[in-house]
Image: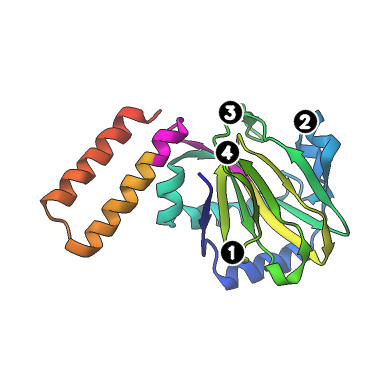
Amino acid sequence: MLLHVPDVLTPAQVADMRRRLDETNWVDGRATVGGQGAQVKRNRQLDEFSPLGQELGRIVLAALARHPLYVAAALPLRHMPPLFNRYEGGEHYGLHVDGAVRSVPGTTLQMRTDLSCTLFLADPHDYDGGELEIVDTYGMHDVKLPAGDLILYPSSSLHRVHPVTRGARVASFFWVQSLVRDPARRQMLFELDQNIQSLREQVGDNAAVVGLTGHYHNLLRQWSEV
């Protein structure tokens, strides 16, 4: 599933985050990747234990918890704390795949990375390049979204960030372990949910809509890993 999730953050939230991020210090982005990623990653990040990053990450996760499209698509069980990165002056991230399991910083918890998220914090007209290229069975997809919007995609996908040749590309990125491990089942549940919501808007909660809602929850009950 490759899904554009619009309006995760308000313009005011984006502006405040950008102001604070533009005033802070950044570290080498290779600090949070393994050997393969370090060979192709050229960008900067907030330190993963940065108080500012942790505060802004909590704002991001709170906004996502209120976003029905994101919740329906990801069915999140747990999140990695959001990180923040910056690309400019030709910085880029070569073709790579995200690690399957990550350790949650500051804890002994490990989580499976089912889904990857990039939340854009710079508008497309503010920088050149910087497209997130995602490769799936249908080909290559270049993604460059408005500030405050998020792209959700399988962590198993090959992807890269093209060089930024003008301005600065600023974003938050993180991973999700879903309640439903199997992507095909997760996709079916998402499509069923969206159709139920559409029917509910058209006809209200009649017997058919209630029945379909029951089927949705019974499938989720059967497939979830809680």
Q: Please name which of the two marks, 4 or 3, marks the residue nearer to the observer.
A: 4
Query: Looking at the picture, which amino acid does disc 3 mark?
Result: Leu
Q: Which residue is mark 4?
A: 137
Q: Residue at image x 60%, y 34%?
A: 156
Query: What is the spatial separation of the Cα atoms under label 3 and label 1, in whole angstroms?
Result: 29 Å
- Looking at the image, is mark 2 or mark 3 earlier in the sequence? 2
Residue sitting nearer the eye, 213 or 52: 213
The residue segment tinted magenta is: 174-187
Estimate the spatial distance between the alpha carbons at disc 1 and disc 4, rounded to whole Å: 27 Å
Q: Is residue 176 magenta?
A: yes
Measured Cα–Cα span from mark 4 to mark 3: 32 Å
Asked whether residue 143 is in view, the answer is: yes
Q: Position of residue 8 (x, y in %)?
A: 52, 61
First reached walking from the N terminus: tag 1 or tag 2: 2
Closest to the camera, between mark 2 and mark 3, is 2
Q: Is residue 179 visible?
A: no
Identified by mark 2, the residue type is: Gly
Q: Nearer the viewer, residue 129 or 47?
A: 129
- The residue to which callout 1 is attached is 148
- The spot of residue 49 in percent (x, y) is 72, 44
Q: CA distance from mark 1 to mark 2?
A: 29 Å
* Residue drawn where x is 16% and y is 56% of the image: 205
Q: Which mark is residue 34?
A: 2
